[in-house]
Amino acid sequence: MKCEKFEEIVILYLEKKLKKEEKKKIDDHLKNCDRCREYLIFVKELLIDKKFEKDKFYWEKLRKNIINRIENYIQVWNIRKLKFKKGLIVFLLIFSFVLNYLVKIEKVQHITKYYHFYRDYKIVKNLEELKKLVFCENENECED
């Protein structure tokens, strides 16, 4: 067997999907060829997880690790949602106070803008009352 041919079918050899004759040819070739033996070791290290070979509970640990990562992600997401809600509440409170303040300022501005009309009206109203009083004193016929 040639080394190029071995390199093409090394994966099948490792997965044990070859016929008996081909497997025997590869075994014979590996006994004589150092380069192909090193290549086989290299491919094994790439394809086979050493943790899986050594640890019987690899899949259980992997499953627990994945579940823990999902739970941590959910906790972090819940904390972020809570912080967002708190921030939104604080923003709305500040916004309502500012809006209330602006409304009050607008009312004050409105009052000061039209205060001279009110003041003039009050003066005129007082003058009318004064005229009535003066008229009543002169006529002696006042109606209350």
Image: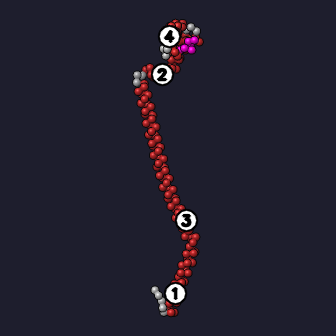
Mark 1 lies on a secondary structure that is helix
Display coloring: secondary structure
Dot 2, how many residues are within 10 Å of its Cα: few (below 14), some (14-19), or many (20+)?
few
Query: Which labelled disc corresponds to residue 116?
Result: none
Query: In 3D space, how far apart are the residues under numbered discs 2 and 4 (Cα atoms)?
Result: 25 Å
Mark 3 lies on a secondary structure that is helix
Q: Quickly name the residue at label 1.
A: 132
Query: In 3D space, how far apart are the residues under numbered discs 4 and 1 (Cα atoms)?
Result: 128 Å
Horizontally, residue 110 falls left or right of residue 73, namely right
Residue drawn at x 55%, y 81% as measured from the top left: 124
Q: Quickly name the residue at label 2.
A: 49
Query: In 3D space, how far apart are the residues under numbered discs 3 and 1 (Cα atoms)?
Result: 38 Å
**Amino acid type for the residue under numbered disc 2:** Asp
- From this view, report whether residue 73 is shown above or below residue 127: above
Residue 77: x %, y % from top left: 47, 41
Q: Earlier in the sequence, mark 2 or mark 1?
A: 2
Residue drawn at x 51%, y 7% as measured from the top left: 21
Dot 1, how many residues are within 10 Å of its Cα: few (below 14), some (14-19), or many (20+)?
some
Which marked residue is nearer to the observer: mark 4 or mark 1? Answer: 4
Q: Is residue 129 visible?
A: yes
Q: Quickly name the residue at label 3.
A: 106
From which residue to which does the magenta span run? Answer: 5-10
Q: Earlier in the sequence, mark 3 or mark 1?
A: 3
Locate the N terminus by quadrant: top right
Which marked residue is nearer to the observer: mark 2 or mark 1? Answer: 1
**Amino acid type for the residue under numbered disc 3:** Glu
